[in-house]
Structure formats: C-alpha cells, structure tokens
Amino acid sequence: PDGVFDERAGPYAGSFVRDANDDIVADLDDAGDMLASGHLDHDYGHCWRCDTGIVQIVTDQWFITVTDIKEDLLANIEDSEWYPQEARDSRFTDFVENSPDWNVSRQRYWGIPIPIWLPSETEDGESEAQSASDNSSGQTPREPIQWSGDMDDAIVIGTREELADRVDQEIDPDSVDLHKGTVDDLTITEDRTDAADAAEEAVVYERVPDVFDVWLDSSVASWGTLDYPENEERFEELWPADLIMEAHDQTRGWFWSQLGMGTTALDQIPYERVLMHGHALMPDGRAMSKSKDILIDPHEVIEKHGVDPMRGFLLSVTPQEDDMRFSWEGVGTVSRDLNILWNVFRFPLPYMELDGFEPGGADPASVAGDLETVDEWLLARYNSVVAGMTDHWEAFRQDKALELLREFIVEDLSRFYVQVVRERMWAEEDNPSKLAAYHTLAHVLEGIVRLLAPYTPLVADEIYTTLVGDAGYETVHMCDWPEADDRWLDETLETDIGLLRAVEEAGSNARQQAERKLRWPVPEVVVAAGDDRTVEAVRRHRRLLADRLNAETIGIVGPGEEWGKLRYSAEADMSKLGPTFGDRAGEVMQAMNEARLPEPTLSALEDALEDVLDAGDDLTAEMVEFVTETPEDITAAPIDRDGEEHGVVYVDTSLTEEIESEGYAREVIRRVQEMRKELELDIEAEIRVDLSIGDDRVADLVARHEDLIAREVR
C-alpha cells in the first residue's frame, strides 16, 4: 500500500517503486533485455488532496457483471427523459455501451463493509481474508488462495438480523456498529462437507477486508431511503424518483451507478428525469480550484453586488447543461436590472398612498371598463411572459425564463408602460383612468415578484411584502407560481404595440438627427409603412403614437404609395451610360444628376430628361440609382423591428410660435421638477415659482403656458 517493494522484488526490496526505475532500466540494459528507453510525456493520475502521483497496481477486486445485462441497461435508459436529451442519446448511451463490469470493492477503512465471509483457513493455515487482503496491496500472495471463487463457498449476509443470527459473537442487531472496526472481528462457523472424504468439518469464515465503492452506496439510495424491501407501501408510492440532477461529470458516477443497480436489483431505471448541468469556470474559461487559489470568492461578489444579483446571474447566464464562465459584468447587469425593477416598484407608491389605494387588493378585472389600451397591452404581455416562463421552466431552461422576465421588466414595464402612464398617476383628481393604472401596475408587479422569487428571493420578498401588506402571505415564497390568465391574452394587441414601439423608436431617431428633444412638439410625423400590418397597427393606435412622439398629427403612407412631400434624385452610373450614349453620356449624366422627380421610376426620369433624350433612347435600371430627398426641416429614420425593416418614419421638425411656446414651457417644467427633486420635496408639497428669463421673446412665449407650468409643477 505504501508503494515500497518487499523482499519478493529481490535487489529492489525496500525501494519506492519510482526510485527503483533507474536501477531496473540499467539492469535490463546490462542483461541485453532492453529494446529501447526514453521519456514520454503523458497525463497521469494524481491524488486530488495531496497532488501526489498515484502508483497503479493490479489487484483482485469484486465486480458486478453488468456486461451480462448490457441490453437491459440500454433498454432502461429509454425510459428516462434527459435535459438536455442529447446527453442521454449520445454521451450516456455511449458510456453504457462501452462500460466494463463494475468494480465495487475498495481497500479503505471508511465505507460500507462488503458483507461477504470466506473460509478462514488456507492449506498453510493462512486466513482467506488475510490472503485476499495481501493480494489487494498489489503484491503476489505467498500461498494461492484456496477459495474456488464460487459464491456457493461464500456466505453473503443480507440484514442485521441475519448477521446477529449467524455470527459466533453475541451482538444486538439494532445497535451493532456496521463498520470495519466492528465487523472485521465477527466470525461465522459453519459445518462444511469435505469433497475428498465426505467428512463434515467446522469451518470458520472471516469477512473479506474490503469496503464497497461509495457509488454503490449512492446507487441504492432511491429505494434504501424508503426502507425497501421492508416498507413496500412507501416504495410503491414514491419510487422511482421524479428527478435527479448533477453535473456532466456524473455520467460515470451518479447517473450510471443508479442505472446499474436499479437494473441489476429491480430491472428498472430508478429515476424518470435527469437534469444535467455544467460547471462554474473562471472568466477566462479555466476550471476553478480552491487548492490552487483559482476561484471567485462569493463573499467578494456579495460585498460588491449583493446576494440576489449573484444568484440571478448564476441561474441565467447559460443553459443549465453548459459550463458557465463567471462574469463580473454579467452580475452587474443583473444588479442594474433589479435596480430598474426597484425604481418601478417605488414609483407609484407615493401616489397610491395619497389616494388611499391599497395595492394588495389590486384586481384589473374590477376596473375592466376603465382600462386603457396600454393597460390591456401590459396585462397581455405579462400573461404571455407567465406562459413563456412556465414553458421554459418545464423544459429546465431557467435561463431563457429569466431572460423573458428581465426583458419584460426593463423594456416593456420600465421603458414603455411607466413612461406612458406617468401623467395619469400625476393627476390630482380621482379619475377612473388613474385607478385603472393603479390596479394594472400593482397586479403586474405582484406577479413579477412571484416569477422572480426563485432567482432573487430577497428582493422579490421585500417588494412583495411591501406591496401586499396584510392582504397577502407573510412571504412571497408561500405564493403559488402564477398561471397565465387567458382573458387578458391578446396576440394582436401585443403585435400592434410592438410595431408601434418600433415606429416610436424610428421617430425618436429622426428627432435626434434634427436635435429636437421629445419635450418639444412637432407638427407632423408621417409613417411610410412597408407592410399592411404596420398600417393597421398605426391606424388603430394613432393617438397613442402621437402622444409618444409628441406630434400634433400622424400621417400614414401605405405600401406602394409615395408621400407627396418627398422628392427624388437620380445618380447616374457612367460605366453603364457610356456604352449606350457614347459622346452624349456626359450630357445625359449631368441632366440625370440635376433632375428632381416626383417618384423614383424610370418613366418619371425619362419625362424629366425629355430635352436630352432622343427618340429610341431607353434608360435601364442598371444606369441609375434613385435617392430620396426629404424637404428642409424633415428628417427620416427606418422602422426596424427584430432586424426586419417595416418602412420609414418622417418627422417634420419645423418651428412655429405655438410649438416654441410649448417647448420652452416644457423646458421650464423640467428644470423646476429637477429643483423639487434636489430639495427632496414631498409630492403633495406646493411651491411658488418665480421665473427670470433674459430673452423677452422667450419670456412672452413661456407666459402663454403659465397654467400648464403651474399644473405640472404644483
């Protein structure tokens, strides 16, 4: 066991096996038995604790001959579902197909003693058990073992009661310590008939010194913990296991050992579903190792970002079957998203408190008649997210589930819905619209934290308990997982608002080109839709789009139509004109470049060039590229949704006195609101505002909207 040659090694006795290498090589060379010598670099097993190289030796061991039931093993695999399925169909199946008989014995002190007793005397008086023990050290036994290897010549003990009944010593079956220190001293004496003279003799049996492979212990856990076969009722109720989960390195461990013993003992796989996950890696892809100080200290992550951001990151960064690279940036992103949710949650509370609204009793159905389009849309989106997350969880894709929820919180709830309903909640008077927004937002927030609870339990619980108060459970973790409510699902509305938001983004991009802030109104926004579906969405929700883009009017140009204010120019390709027009090519090109067209067509271009084209001259599409030219004060941006273009938005940014008046008034409102925030004034606190504006014209323009300013800043 210590890797030192004994006297049977002759001149090498007393040497550590590797220390004798040079002497052995030299002796082989001297004897002329050396064919070749050299060094070979290769991977070699080392102790995972002390990092010492392992001395590999051949020993006699106990095996379960699983090769005899290979077809049964492969058939039973088919009775299990794996996530991912590919792990079962390739990785695990390949391993089982090529697996040898299972070595279940180990030469260790700690473990379940193998309950096999062998005859204790060999012909020279040496004990069978001791002979087996010597052999397990890797050295050749001094005398051959007399045990035939036939299990009829061995005693296998199955229960504590059987052990107490058969051993020579007096033991209490209920309290006996079944570890090596005790059972190694227990003997069994049985009468055995000698095959040679048919005489009976008393034979003493001693336990083999080995213990079971720990994976054999684990492999029977699914029924051993149910006290089977003693308790068949619990076994029938609870077995096989619904789910087991481990990392992919357990293909040859937890997954295999349970299949092997389940098939051997019960001819059935002991689990129905397997969730196989990956390992956590360093940011650069290296495996983590505490002993080598290659790791991310979780306490450092918690100190920097908190518990929930770390947990949310770990559960969402990759599919569960993949190895996960830790990312500080990724944890920070989760932290940012949680802060966004926290701000959304805090936003309506002061207004609800002022109005005496209890968010714990929110029920959008109770105000269904007062719900506005965006309320119905948010409820539709929320219930779609619930359905999608449920599907992902059932497929063990918790990463995709959280991705859905985070996108909903950040993009739909924070960046759209809250912005749309903000003014409704600012309204001082009690009105049905504000109440509908309260019910909608509170209901959705409560559902969100239920969905979020498995990922970020602390933040979810804080929001839940604050939101529902005495109207709910003591903790969000007592709540059921939400179910999608079909009455709120509306795929058409979801698509409409999705397209509308793409149009809004295009309009915002066009505004930015003109450096025109959103708080300044514009006379007109024209949506040149690339498809009928976009036209339908804009027509149905024209007023909402006008509010979002702060536009006085919304114009719509359908597919194939041209907006009358646009003009087009033509850029000539001289390489195509030259061969056709020869010496006249320069003249034709100049005329093309100077032409302004009502529509981007060859016929319109030919009409514009009638003075330079001769009869029989034909223009082709290869000769020219049409360019859209927008009028002064009009900017344009494409409508992009999920990488697909749906048309163009044109924004008229021309200024009138009325637009300037409202624009400057909105600038004043923004500055006053910032001052209120800096002074940390309560929402209901009324203020007096004195304006000092250096430009008389601007002052006159602002004065036209004094009522608006007073209403907005209180």
Image: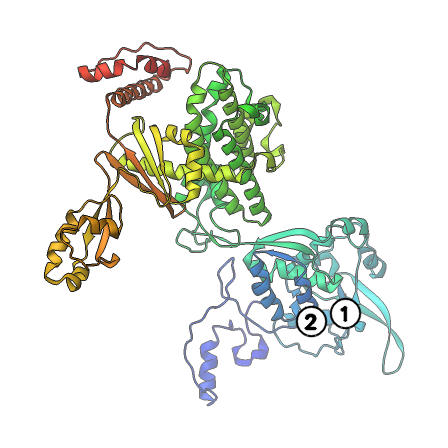
Which residue is labeled 2 in the image? 132
Q: Looking at the rendering, in which quadrant would you find the C terminus? A: top left
**Residue 470 visible in the picture:** yes
At x 17% / y 51%, what residue is drawn?
610
Q: Are marks 1 and 2 in contact (CB under 8 Å)?
A: yes
Q: Secondary structure at mark 2?
A: helix
Q: Earlier in the sequence, mark 1 or mark 2?
A: 1
Give me the disc on residue 653: none
Q: Is residue 430 left or right of residue 587?
A: right
Residue 436 image position (x, y, % from top left): 52, 23
At x 78% / y 53%, what residue is drawn?
228
Name above or below for residue 216 compared with residue 479: below
Name the amino acid type tagged 2. Answer: Ala
Q: Alpha-carbon distance for marks 1 and 2?
A: 10 Å
Q: Quadrant of residue 178?
A: bottom right
| Residue lying farthest to the left in this orientation | 583
Give me the disc on residue 118: 1
Of 62 and 394, the residue lying toward us: 394
At x 37% / y 38%, what residue is drawn?
503
Of 545 and 160, the residue lying toward us: 545
**Mark 2 surroundings: few (<14), some (14-19) or many (≥20) residues within 10 A:** many
Of 265 and 3, the residue lying toward us: 265
Q: Looking at the rendering, in which quadrant would you find the N terminus? A: bottom right
At x 24% / y 24%, what residue is drawn?
656
